[in-house]
Image (tube, rainbow, N blue to C red):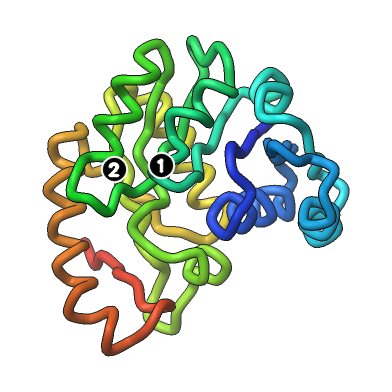
Amino acid sequence: MKIATIGSGNMGGTLGRRWAAVGHRVTFGSREPNSEKMRLLLQASGPQAEAATIREAVERSDVILLAVMAEDIERALSEAGDLKGKLLINCTICFDGTSADAKVRSLVRDARVVRAFHNFTWEVLANPCYEGGRAAAFLSGDDPEAVAVVASLATDIGLDAIDVGDPESMAKVEAAVGMLWGVLGSRFGREYSLGVLRR
């Protein structure tokens, strides 16, 4: 699959590197695709990865990962260009109490938006397998086919993909995960994650 990342920091860089390692074609979209930081990321990602401007990365890919800071969402999406029909994975977080999901959906009404990979740290994404099981990746979206694609991408890198339903249901999951993080994150650190046991 051809995947572009908008953002190549800890989250975008880790996901892109891991997808490239399992055979997906990854283009890291960056405002500085020729930087030393990008050279090192490409070196770590292997032959399945390349770097380009954000717009070039989007044009070359079928799946787009949005992995930027909240204050950069509008700028990054503007630089991305036409996202009509594209599958956009939104893993951004707004720390001011507003909904990053609602914000992105309002800006890209023609994209197939799936909310995913935002309920844990990049350290967990780098190694999501634990002695007791796999870290749970909660997904939501209005397009079942798009959600299924993202679930497959999550499974490819060792995550336990769980479709929680529509964006309203995801908002409830985010609230619960946030409260748990407030209690358990301080006890177990940044590699703490959640798993879901089911029969």
Amino acid at pointer 2: Asp
Against 164, residue 144 (above or below) is above
Q: How many numbered marks, from 0 up?
A: 2
Q: Nearer the viewer, residue 36 or 46?
A: 36
Reading the image, the residue beneath label 2 is: 163
Say left or right for 142 vs 146: left
Front position in the image: 151 or 181: 181
Label 1: few (<14), some (14–19) or many (≥20) C-alpha neighbours in 10 Å: few
Q: Residue at x 31, y 24 (%)?
A: 105
Q: Which mark is residue 110?
A: none
In the rendered structure, the answer to whether residue 144 lies left or right of residue 73 reads left
Screen quadrant of the C terminus? bottom left
| Depth check, front residue: 172 or 31 | 31
20 versus 168 height, above or below: below
Q: Can you give x and y, in whole percent of width and height, for residue 54 in the image?
A: 66, 29
User: Looking at the figure, which quarter contains the N terminus?
Assistant: top right
The residue to which callout 1 is attached is: 71
The residue that appears at 40% across and 11% down in the rendered structure is 110
Q: What residue lies at 42% left-to-right and 51% top-to-bottom?
A: 117
Relative height, residue 186 to residue 53 (above, below)? below
Residue found at the far bottom of this picture: 187
Above or below 77: residue 138: below
